[in-house]
Image: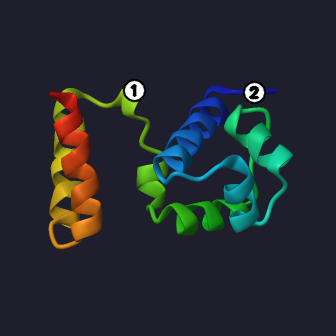
Amino acid sequence: MRNDIQINLGQRIKDLRKIKGLSQEVFAEKIGIATKTLSSIETGNAFMTSQTLEKILEILDITPNELFTFPEHMTNDDMYSYILKKLEFVKNDKERLKIFYNFAKSLY
């Protein structure tokens, strides 16, 4: 039976995977599960093992807090603070900063 945490977490994993530019097939292979299993996780129809969770965090290069922070539950101030924190993190990483720059340019 699906519950809100499974649905929200599955969607969050899917969104973060897509941000990284990974297909379901490639991501599933990297974390060591079948594509069908990943699909079930992303749709909230299945939950993952702790080992799979660790691999997801590693491959997406995120913290557990980032994975379990659902943007739709954040205030504007929280989202703004999060973005500023990430910008500070990428300040010296030209490739990631370029991604932020291109994204910001595309907004206006």
Residue 7 found in image quarter: top right
Amino acid identity at mark 1: Glu
- Distance from Cα at disc 1 to Cα at disc 2: 19 Å
Q: Nearer the viewer, residue 62 or 19?
A: 19
In the image, residue 44 lies at what x, y percent? 71, 33
Task: Check disc 1 and report the residue beneath it.
Answer: 72
At 46% from the left and 47% from the top, the residue drawn is 19
Q: Nearer the viewer, residue 80 or 14?
A: 14
In the image, residue 4 lies at what x, y percent? 62, 27
Residue 92 found in image quarter: bottom left
Q: Is residue 21 above or below residue 91?
A: above
Res. 82 visible in picture: no
- SS category of the residue bearing label 2: loop
Q: Which mark is residue 90?
A: none
Colour setup of the view: rainbow
In the image, residue 102 lies at what x, y percent? 23, 46
Within 10 angstroms of label 2, few (less than 14), some, or many (20 or more) residues? few
At 70% from the left and 48% from the top, the residue drawn is 24
Q: Which mark is residue 2?
A: 2
At 75% from the left and 47% from the top, the residue drawn is 38
- SS category of the residue bearing label 1: helix
N-term mark: 1 or 2 = 2
Amino acid identity at mark 2: Arg
Q: Quadrant of the C terminus?
A: top left
Residue 1 found in image quarter: top right
Res. 25 visible in picture: yes
Q: Nearer the viewer, residue 10 or 102?
A: 102
